[in-house]
Amino acid sequence: MMTMHELTGWLLAALAGAGLGVLFFGGLWWTVRKGVASRQPALWFLGSLLLRTGVVGAGFVLVGADDWRRLLLCLLGFVLGRIAVTRLTRTAAHVDPPAELPDAP
């Protein structure tokens, strides 16, 4: 039988995974927006990749703490965080096209 302490730990693992997912994919979205306008986009993308991967990897190690169930719940939360960021950024990225497009030469 599951105790309240275990249930709380599992819930926190899933929430931590969701936070890591939002951090990773939100950071990716932010990096792409900043990187394409930068004079040195490779530096932005490489630095962001290393930072995001390091933070998420450390987060999974800390949350998993030798318990495969917490690690699995953290992964589930991570995927749910990705879905949330994808939906939020998709609506923010859509901009109405201009009423009249200029004629191309």
Image (cartoon, helix red, strand yellow):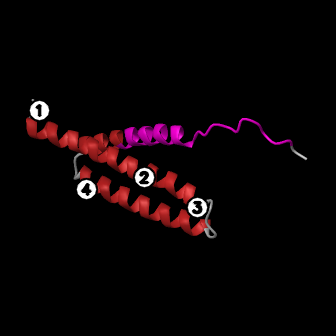
Q: Is residue 68 visible?
A: no
Q: Which residue is mark 3?
A: 35
Mark 4 against mark 2, which lies toward the viewer?
2
Say the numbered circle drawn on residue 62: 4
Q: CA distance from mark 3 to mark 4?
A: 30 Å
**Other-residue count near label 4 (Cα within 10 Å), few / some / many at <14 / 14–19 / ≥20:** few
**Are the residues at dot 1 and dot 4 in contact (C-beta closer than 8 Å)?**
no
Q: The residue tagged with tag 1: helix, strand or loop?
A: loop
Q: Position of residue 68 (x, y in %)?
A: 26, 44
Residue flagged by tag 4: what amino acid is it? Leu
| Residue nearest the viewer, comparing 57 with 66 | 57
**Other-residue count near label 3 (Cα within 10 Å), few / some / many at <14 / 14–19 / ≥20:** some
Q: Earlier in the sequence, mark 1 or mark 3?
A: 1
Bounds of the magenta segment: 78-103
Residue flagged by tag 3: what amino acid is it? Gly
Q: The residue tagged with tag 3: helix, strand or loop?
A: helix
Identify the residue at horizontal 35%, vertical 50% (top origin): 20
Q: The residue tagged with tag 2: helix, strand or loop?
A: helix
Is-magenta flag for residue 102?
yes
Identify the residue at horizontal 50%, vertical 67% (top origin): 47
Is-magenta flag for residue 66?
no
Q: Position of residue 98 (x, y in %)?
A: 70, 39
Q: Which residue is mark 1?
A: 2
Q: Earlier in the sequence, mark 1 or mark 4?
A: 1
Q: Is residue 30 visible?
A: yes
Q: Which residue is mark 2?
A: 24
Q: Position of residue 18 (x, y in %)?
A: 33, 44
